[in-house]
Every structure is written in C-alpha cells, then in structure tokens.
Amino acid sequence: MKLSTRTRYGTRALLELALHRGEGPVFLKDIARQQQISLSYLEHLVAPLISGGIVRSIKGPKGGVTLAKKPEEIRLLEVNRLLEGSLAPVECVDNPDICERSAKCVTRDIWGEVKAAMNSVLEATTLQDLVERQKKKGLNQSKMYYI
C-alpha cells in the first residue's frame, strides 16, 4: 500500500514550514521550489490544511503561509486525514455494510489491523518529530529530504 502524493507532498510542505518557524510567513512559491512541487498542486494541498486549522494564510506583500499550531501539536495522522481521508486499504474496513461477507471475512480483519497499525504510527508522530529527525540526519538545507 502506498500513500498518495497528497500526503507525501503535504507533509513535506508542512516540514518546510516547521523548519522556518519563527521566521515569518513563507511564500508558497518558495516551498514549491524547495520541495520541487508544482505551485498549482501545492495550492490545492494547502487549502484543506488551512480549513483544518494546521496552516494559516496571511495576505499582503509580506504574507504567505505559516503553521497555525506548534509542530509538536501537529500529528501526521491529522495531516493524512485532512489530505486523504481514511488509511483503510479496502473500503469494507470502514464500511462493513458494503459487503455481506464482512462479519466472517478473515482478510478484512487483517486489513483492519493494517489500518490500525498505520494509524498508530502516524498518531504517535508529530511534525516536531520530523524536524528532529531532519536535524539528526545533519541535513541543514530543507530541500535535501524527501518523504
């Protein structure tokens, strides 16, 4: 199972904001350039993050985007839910009524465990954890990492 580019790129954009926290708003074009993400795609990713209260948009000549919360308050599970929705690998995990076999299906049980394991890792991981991991790797330039 793979995460889509929405979550991967959205997480990279948030990490970029976390790395520049305290420096003021960051232009989306700068995040796009640093992370090698198309600006138009990044604009689509930022909208649900703003609506979800993770990112704040500031208008004006010195505007841009900034984190609306502290990096230690932003869990990757929340980011994933805003950008993708559920991590269920098959639809019947979240909607057992769509399949008459759901109650007795052992493979559905496994897919539910996969979802729970992924949710657990993402719930336990904050944006600050990513910042610290970046620092441990000794990468001083934010454009040098990819998730």
Image (cartoon, rainbow, N blue to C red):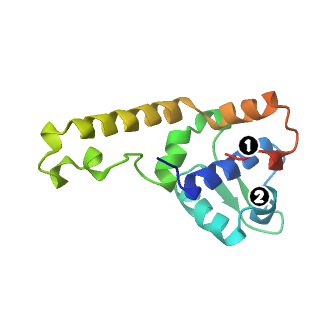
Q: Amino acid at mark 2?
A: Ile
- Give the residue at mark 2: 31
- Give the residue at mark 1: 18
- From the viewer's perspective, tell me whether residue 51 is left or right of residue 144: left
Q: Secondary structure at mark 1?
A: helix
* Residue 17 image offset from top left, x and y in percent: 74, 48
* Residue 31 image offset from top left, x and y in percent: 77, 58
- Along the polypeptide, which appears first: circle 2 or circle 1? 1
**Which quadrant would residue 139 be assigned to in this image?**
top right
- From the viewer's perspective, tell me whether residue 47 is left or right of residue 42: left
Question: At x 44% / y 36%, what residue is drawn?
Answer: 119
Measured Cα–Cα span from mark 2 to mark 1: 11 Å
Nearest-to-viewer mark from 2 and 1: 2
List the single residue furthest toward the front: 107
Question: At x 37% / y 46%, what residue is drawn?
Answer: 88
Q: Quadrant of the C terminus?
A: top right
Q: Which mark is residue 147?
A: none
* Residue 146 image offset from top left, x and y in percent: 72, 47
List the single residue furthest toward the bottom: 40
**Which quadrant would residue 36 be assigned to in this image?**
bottom right
Q: Amino acid at mark 1?
A: Ala
Question: At x 61% / y 34%, what residue is drawn?
Answer: 126
Closest to the observer, 145 or 22: 145
Q: Secondary structure at mark 2?
A: helix
